[in-house]
Amino acid sequence: MKLCIISHTEHYKTHEGYIVGWGPTVGEINHLTSVFDEIYHVAMLHKGEAPPSALPYRSSKIKFIELPALGGQTFGAKLSTVWNAPKVISVVNKTLRKVDYFQLRTPTGIGVFLIPYLTLFVKNKGWYKYAGNWNQENPPLGYRLQRTMLNRQKRKVTINGNWPNQADHCITFENPCLTQADIKSGTSIIVTKTIKDKFNFCYVGRLERPKGVERIIKGVIGLSSEVQKRIGTIHLVGDGAEKEAFINMAKETKVDIQFHGFLSRHKVFEIYKKSHFFLMPTTASEGFPKVIAEAYNFGCIPIVSDVSAISQYVKHKFNGFIVTPVTSEGVTRQLNEILELASVDYQLLLKERTTFVEPFSYEHYNNRIMNIILNLKSVN
């Protein structure tokens, strides 16, 4: 079986001439080689240095097919995407001739014209993956168009969460992030993980306001000096245009807030292992951030917001905490409660960890992909 994956995933060429891409997507594709004999990844090649989170493909079964780097919020960027539509369609069309199946990963700028193209003109069996917030009330125009088109075509669509009036062809689907070795390692970690005198926290993702970084820092600033003493270290992993502003903001507290920048997958896991809680009071357009499952696997109890499908997995005071309201004051209030927890309370919150993380394993994901493949129908 041969698969064509079409996405906006960022790829880079290293100084040695190797192609590397955004770690979570490349990791997922690396594991799909146990399902498919060949995988062609049609995606975007960017200039510049690859971030430490980028990974190489591990198999000769995977072929990278270059697209120009498109997308962005400016009018010029959107115009460039439209201008390059014929070139993108041509590359996609040539690749589809080599494969049996396709997967288009949305929402993405090129999805606005690729969804109708694939729906109307392509006979290959295939499915769509919508990684954003499927239930978002006021999405950007491009996202809204793509969601509407996906709702009104016949092929399967994998989505985050389970929603009222969900169409039959839209399938609730967890996105993978953990190997069986990761889960085994997490099991050995949490057996001995306790809270002694200090609570350690972490965040992994883009350093920007919508993701909740400002709320985290201001939430900590809002704690009394006595309560702040119970915090060991807050690890912020990632980068973004607002990083310097956040660094300056963090100087307003004596709490040890460390900015790590981008880290490799291995180093991120080391942060999880020494942290007790994972912070993400986001208001961004999320599907279900995989970092929540990664962190919980290593004993980081999620402290998150009720956005999209997040609260369908994280249950308040059962296996995590839901920040309400999603403000810096809400974060302060939740931290005040958490910093009163005893080690036995922390252990109780970890009891549901195995049930929570198993659906996010690559093994579980591949089994579900195989089930989709077996049930795909040709589009006439």
Image (tube, helix red, strand yellow):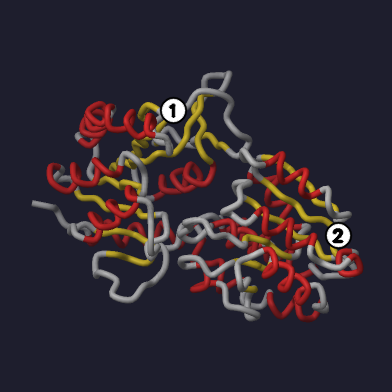
Residue drawn at 35 percent across, 39 percent down: 39
Residue drawn at 71 percent across, 73 percent down: 334
Is residue 63 visible to us here?
Answer: no
Q: Badge 2 local density, few (<14 within 10 Å), some, or many (20+)? A: some
Q: Amino acid at mark 1?
A: Leu
The residue indicated by pointer 1 is 45
The residue indicated by pointer 2 is 232
In the image, is residue 235 above or below residue 76?
below
Quarter of the image holding residue 212?
Answer: bottom right
Q: Residue furthest left?
A: 380
Residue drawn at 74 percent across, 56 percent down: 217
Is residue 136 visible to us here?
Answer: yes
x and y percent of residue 103 in the render? 31, 47
Cα separation between marks 1 and 2: 40 Å
345 on left or right of 29: right
x and y percent of residue 32 in the render? 41, 48
In the image, is residue 106 above or below residue 341?
above
Mark 2 residue element: strand
43 on left or right of 53: left
Looking at the image, tell me whether mark 1 or mark 2 is earlier in sequence order: 1
Labelled disc at residue 317: none
Residue drawn at 24 percent across, 61 percent down: 151
Quarter of the image holding residue 182?
Answer: bottom right
Q: Badge 1 local density, few (<14 within 10 Å), some, or many (20+)? A: many
In the image, is residue 66 above or below residue 23?
above
x and y percent of residue 128 in the render? 30, 52
235 on left or right of 371: right
x and y percent of residue 28 in the render? 47, 48
Q: Amino acid at mark 2?
A: Gly
**Of residues 42 and 316, the one drawn nearer to the viewer in this rendering:** 316
Mark 1 residue element: strand
Quadrant location, the N terminus: top left
